[in-house]
């Protein structure tokens, strides 16, 4: 096995409230791994811990065979770990192009060719962003904004792309389009960890998945096995 990420016995608390307790999971290079579960199960907290956004009470996080526990978000990004946050968090008063420029902050000014290569790759993946590159990001539709948030992350050329609820607030057509693009991104060599309440869509595209419940992992396995699991079918897939 060739793990790009391994988390061991991760525990996080918000004051007296335990958000995660001894959670362990991993991602192989080239995989799409889904984290599913109800609200308050600790899914987003786990993502924030990976990105250095919440303090860790106990546990280990190894990314590409390096202990990254305690590293700041900007250092983690430079190592190839990038988050597309819930709610997209784009710069609404800036243009589409300027948002993508902000995503390329790790590319030095004297590497214009590298910047052009990355932005053309994003425009090829999301042609609508090229059409709207001078448009203010806040005027885009929700689906287009999600494409922009993903495109901005790809400007960093991550080894591991983390996504927190990418289908949230999107129409069914845009949900379908976004998940198709995630498969394309994965096929191009980027490993993906996706936290998603739309369990069916997540299980359609992932290789493996983890079910979080009340701060711990209740189930894990390959997607085919989880799709057959009676608990998954009853709770998340409508029986």
Image (spheres, rainbow, N blue to C red):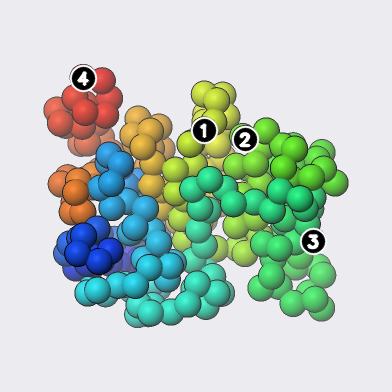
Nearer to us of marks 3 and 4 is 4
State the residue at coordinates (73%, 45%): 137
SS of the residue at dot 4? loop
- Point out the tag, 4 or 2, that comes first from the N-terminus: 2
Looking at the image, tell me whether mark 2 or mark 1 is earlier in sequence order. 2
Q: List the residue tagged with mark 2.
A: 142
Q: Is residue 128 left or right of residue 211?
A: right
Query: In terms of sequence position, does the residue under pointer 1 or pointer 4 come before the other?
Result: 1
Whichever of callouts 1 and 3 sits on the residue coming sooner in the sequence is 3
Q: Earlier in the sequence, mark 2 or mark 3?
A: 3
Front label number (2 vs 3): 2
Disc 2 secondary structure class: helix
Disc number for residue 17? none
Q: Compare residues 134 and 39 and report the one nearer the observer.
A: 39
Task: Assess disc 4: are there few (<14), some (14-19) or many (≥20) residues with their C-alpha within 10 Å of its C-alpha.
Answer: few
What is the secondary structure assignment of the residue under circle 1?
loop
Q: Residue 187 appears at what percent x and percent y?
A: 51, 48
Image quadrant in which the C terminus is located: top left
Provide residue 153's location: percent of width, then percent of height.
60, 57
Whole-number angstrom distance, CA of label 1 to CA of label 4: 24 Å
Residue at mark 4 to residue at mark 2: CA–CA distance: 30 Å
- Gap between marks 2 and 1, in whole Å? 7 Å
Residue marked by disc 4: 239
| Pointer 3 residue | 116
Which residue occupies 20% across, 60% down? 18
Q: Is mark 4 in CB contact (under 8 Å) with mark 2?
A: no
- Secondary element under disc 3, as helix, strand or loop, is helix
Q: Residues within 10 Å of mark 2 (few under 14, many from 20)?
A: some
What residue would you read off at disc 1? 169
Residue 6 in the image: state x and y as whole percent: 30, 67
Density class for disc 1 (Cα within 10 Å; few <14, some 14-19, many ≥20) is few
Instruction: Tell me the CA gap for discs 3 and 4.
Output: 48 Å
């Amino acid at each position: 096995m060739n793990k790009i990420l391994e988390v061991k016995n991760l525990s996080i608390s918000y004051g007296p409230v335990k958000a995660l307790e001894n959670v362990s999971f991993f991602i192989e290079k080239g995989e799409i791994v889904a984290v599913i579960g109800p609200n308050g199960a600790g899914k987003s907290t786990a993502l924030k811990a990976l990105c250095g956004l919440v303090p860790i009470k106990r546990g280990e996080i190894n990314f590409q065979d390096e202990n990254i526990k305690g590293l700041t978000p900007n250092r983690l990004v430079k190592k190839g770990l990038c988050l597309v946050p819930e709610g997209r968090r784009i710069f609404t008063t800036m243009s589409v192009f300027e948002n993508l420029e902000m995503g390329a902050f790790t590319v030095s000014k004297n590497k214009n060719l590298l910047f052009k290569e990355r932005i053309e790759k994003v425009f090829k993946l999301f042609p609508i962003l090229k059409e709207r590159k001078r448009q203010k990001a806040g005027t885009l539709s929700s689906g287009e904004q999600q494409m922009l948030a993903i495109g901005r992350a790809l400007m960093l050329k991550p080894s591991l792309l983390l996504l927190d609820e990418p289908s949230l607030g999107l129409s069914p057509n845009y949900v379908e389009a976004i998940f198709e693009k995630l498969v394309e991104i994965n096929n191009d060599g980027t490993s993906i960890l996706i936290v998603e309440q739309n369990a069916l869509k997540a299980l359609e595209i992932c290789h493996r998945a983890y079910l979080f419940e009340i701060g711990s992992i209740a189930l894990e396995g390959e997607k085919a096995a989880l799709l057959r699991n009676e608990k998954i079918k009853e709770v998340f897939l409508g029986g």
